[in-house]
Amino acid sequence: ANGIAYVQAAIDTGQMVDEFAPRLSFFFNSHIDFLEEIAKFRAARRLWARIMRERFRAANPRSWMLRFHTQTAGCTLTAQQPRSNMVRVALQALSAALGGTQSLHTNSWDEALALPSEEAATLALRTQQIIAYESGIGDTVDPLGGSYYIEDLTSRLEAEAQDYLDRIGEMGGAVQAIEQGFIQQEIQDSAYRYQREIEDGDRVVVGVNKFSTAGEETPSGLLRVDPEVETHQCARLAAVRRDRDQGRVERCLADLRRAAAGTDNLMPFLLEAVKAYASLGEISDVLRETFGEYTAPQWV
């Protein structure tokens, strides 16, 4: 639904769909239900191809392609028996690859406890490399295509996703659905159901509500960030602000403010501000002053 809103907004500015659609990309999460996740990615690809062909009349086959990046599910990482997260991440990465992802981020096993250590981050990388270079699943496109269960599940997920798109369309689109709090409410309800299933024992999480071990200790080797890093970074920022051309920074920010108040493409102005060493905070402040700051409705 977000993708539809972006495409329509671009078309409304006078752009031809096949001029920009091949550059679009999506960001998905890979959760823990292995076969369902594979079907989810396949359903998304089929759904987007149909939307681009039938709704937006895209003629370029590259416009029909749903390019997507996948990150393994951080919410499935457990602080209890954290090394079990290695298996979770491997399964989630494998489902993303089998589902057709173009790029992949694998979480580190220790992220429920700390920022990733170098050793844990290396293992996350090796997980991808073993899948890519040793498993053989990349030797063919859609290796699970034709499986009765996968095909049936893909079709069911696609139909249920279309139901959501129809409901959102009746509200006026993704923007209106967000403004009405619908999408936020659906996410909150889903998260609540998921947590209740864990706490009630209806959903097994190994090491948390089943197969737990008494007297577990926090594993060694976790990353501890030296407080000196903050001092060093503050000094670097102060040096940049001291040495940059402040007049150029102010001119670039003023140009950005004027562009944001109109209908110009902001990207050239953002790039100029960055080249002048305006900070991210300074750039964001200009946009906040111009557009205001969105506050999501609160739902209980």
Image: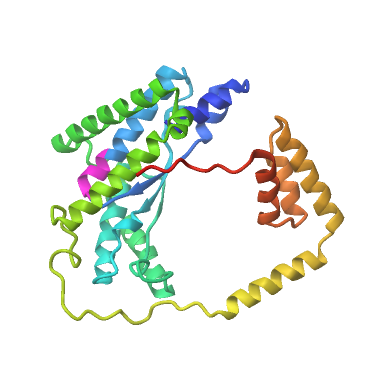
Name the image quarter holding residue 217: bottom left
The x, y position of residue 127, in whole percent, is 33, 62
The x, y position of residue 297, in whole percent, is 45, 40
Q: Which residues are magenta?
A: 33-39
Q: Is residue 261 left or right of residue 64?
A: right
Which residue is the extreme one toward the right? 247
Snapshot colouring: rainbow
Q: Is residue 152 visible?
A: yes
**Quarter of the image where the C terminus is located:** top left
Residue drawn 69% across and 40% down?
290
Task: Tell me: residue 170, above or below residue 48.
Answer: above
| Along the viewing direction, whichever of 121 and 293 lies nearer the viewer | 293
Name the image quarter holding residue 239: bottom right
Q: Is residue 174 left or right of residue 212?
A: right
| Along the viewing direction, whichever of 93 and 174 lies nearer the viewer | 174
Task: Tell me: residue 21, above or below residue 28.
Answer: above
| Along the viewing direction, whichever of 107 and 169 lies nearer the viewer | 169
The x, y position of residue 80, in whole percent, is 25, 70
Q: Is residue 36 magenta?
A: yes
Name the image quarter holding residue 61: top left
Residue drawn 66% across and 50% down?
284
